[in-house]
Image: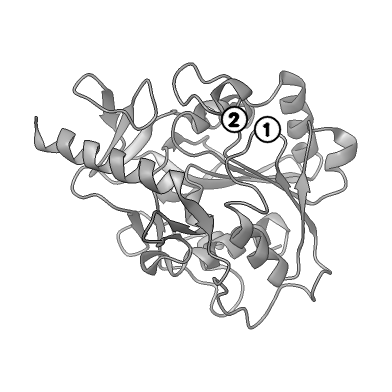
Amino acid sequence: MNKSLTLLLILQTLVLTLYAQQIADTTYMPALPNPAYSQGRGSVVFIDEGHFNFHTKEGRYKSFASLLERDGYVVKEYAGVFSKESLEKGKILVISNALNEMNEHNWFLPTPSAFTPDEIKVVKRWVQSGGSLFLIADHMPLAGAAAELAAAFQFEFTNGFVLDTLQNGPAIFKRHDGTLADNKITNGNRTGDRVEEVATFTGQGFKIPNDATPILTFSNRYVNFLPDTAWVFDNHTQRLPAEGLTQGAFKKYGKGRLVVFGEAAMFSAQLAGPERRKMGMNADVASQNYKLLLNIIHWLDGQYD
């Protein structure tokens, strides 16, 4: 067995153990000296829970929701199918790791869309009319489940796993080496908003349209693995270079806005495994992730105009 396959098998075992034992870190509360709004006076942010989502407001995204609420936003669960009437009651829609029902407990190919064609049309029109969408879709099968929705905005998901060929652990994106871009979202609009580096915790890489601006870009040390079953890698697993693929980007669409990310745990704060290992915004290597999340929400909210 070669070294790279051995590393993949070790990573597979570790991650499956962590996935099975994830709880929200309710003690995670970074300082927010200047909230965007007074408590409960901000825009309404919906977190989708109507599509077998792996991340929900009171589950793995509890710290995500808490951070936004402390920043003054009104965060609500969105249950059921997407409709024009319901979406118009909110300003920002967060979709994180939606799944088709057939993949809820079966993480292998095929990975059909989590959304109906009618729902995709509704969301597209809502964004075009001024809504703001934050679409987060992790590695396979989660990327596959959101691929058709992403394609409606010209983003091309790869439905794989982008992994570091040199070491296990989080991917670190840094401003000084260009993997973390210099733009209005990474800079923010207030003192202390600037982000120098962030960490992600295994996800997909995707291609972006010409009118999108990258936030996170993979270097040549990463490889895109395309397995038939999530977290199952062997010598027959297709693998492609990941250099140049993106893991975060944003664009305007009509009167609305769109931010797309290929990794979800980076915006959570979890305690994983029997040792309660910190994973997400609460991890030592991800101390600036919360700033990036707030900058994204502020841009989607139109605060940078």
Residue 205 pos. (x, y %): 41, 37
Q: Which residue is mark 2?
A: 99
Quarter-wise, where is residue 122 in the image?
A: top right
Residue at point 71%, 62% (across, down): 305
Q: Are marks 2 and 1 in contact (CB under 8 Å)?
A: yes
Is residue 82 shown above or below 100?
below
Q: Nearer the viewer, residue 231 or 186?
A: 231
Q: How is the image coloured?
A: one colour
Is residue 146 shown above or below 272?
above
Quarter-wise, where is residue 136 in the image?
A: top right
Q: Which residue is mark 1?
A: 51
Quarter-wise, where is residue 240 in the image?
A: top left
Q: Could you tell whether 283 is left or right of 257 in the image?
A: left
Secondary element at image label 2: loop
Secondary element at image label 1: loop
The amino acid on which the numbered mark 2 sits, given as a three-letter code, is: Leu
Is residue 296 shown above or below 251?
below
Whichever of labels 2 and 1 marks the residue nearer the N terminus, that label is 1
Quadrant of the rendering where the N terminus is positioned? top left
The amino acid on which the numbered mark 1 sits, given as a three-letter code, is: His
Q: Nearer the viewer, residue 58 or 227?
A: 58
What label does residue 92 carry, if any?
Answer: none
Residue at point 57%, 74% (across, down): 29
Distance in Å between CA atoms under marks 2 and 1: 6 Å
